[in-house]
Amino acid sequence: MNLLASEVIAKRVFSHLYIYLDIVFLVALLAVLIFKKRYMTVLFGLVGGVLYMIVDYGIFHLATHSRHIEGGSMFWVLLWMSMSYGITNFVLIWTWIAKDKRTVEFTLFILVWWIVAPMLAQSFGGGLPTVTIWRETGSYHGYMALILLLGYFGGIVYNLLQKDKNKRIPLLRLLLIGIAVQFCWEFSLLIGGIRSDGFGWEQKLNTIVVNSLLETNLGAVPIYCIFILITQRFTESLKKRTDKLSFTERIAELNAVRLRDSK
């Protein structure tokens, strides 16, 4: 069976308690980021949530009609899901690209929650209604693959033209970040019994492999470029930088930073 060519059905089944607990977690995550003065990270995470909602509700539901739901309101469930994974995914990507000195702590804060949240909901939410939501992906995975192709090919061409190796985009690192972020929450949904409930292991493997390679990863290079463009002018605390850096100079500056050295 060709996993990449076959139909992927991304299905989730969860209790209402899972939604309530996750909303509390999202508020806590944003509060921690604000407390640590990661204002730009907070804004980027919120933008990620809005973007996910536009894609999930506007495109997947309204345009392609590939979204289906039982036991809940399509709009409100997708709003929560979009904000949840939009915020967490974009926060993870942003902190890893930035080489934030608290990257490990922020990452573990999110990953541990992804692991325990389904278990808490199953243990204490048995009496609450459940939501079943799923989408077919055959109608649009080709478009997503095209975006992935353009992003990485653009980065490859840029690096081939860039003689100074210190000013090259770290494409391999971006590839690892893009795959790892999606894989971690796909895996946590799978082991928590939420992802692809009722499907065989072949379908579950198909979903986790294809989504991990494609869905978040397609934005890795564009997000990196956005990060460079913003941070060449502003700091994490939203203050305007006194030094003026070009796009390539900001890349060189970031490449010179070790993971836990940035402010």
Image (cartoon, rainbow, N blue to C red):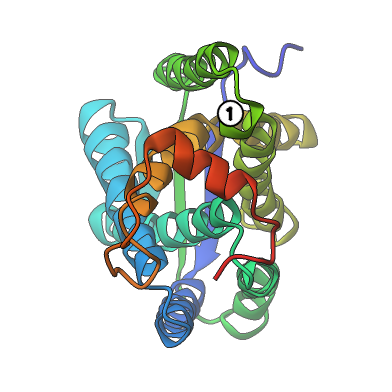
Quick check: can you spot residue 77? no
- Image side of residue 50 versus residue 193, left or right: left
Q: Quadrant of residue 109?
A: bottom right
- Image side of residue 58 versus residue 103, left or right: left
Quick check: can you spot residue 76? yes
User: Is the residue marked by circle 1 packed among few (<14), some (14-19), or many (20+) residues within 10 Å?
Assistant: some
Secondary structure under the numbered disc 1 in the rendered image: loop
Q: Quadrant of the C terminus?
A: bottom right
- Three-letter amino acid code at the position of disc 1: Arg
Position of residue 246 relative to residue 253, above or below, is above
Instruction: Give the x, y percent position of residue 155.
Output: 52, 21
- The answer to which of 46 and 120 lies nearer the viewer is 46
Q: Residue at x 50, y 17 (%)?
A: 158
- The answer to which of 47 and 57 lies nearer the viewer is 47
Instruction: Give the x, y percent position of residue 49.
Output: 34, 56
Q: Residue at x 44, y 83 (%)?
A: 24
Q: Mark 1 sits on what residue?
A: 168
Position of residue 185 relative to residue 123, above or below, is above
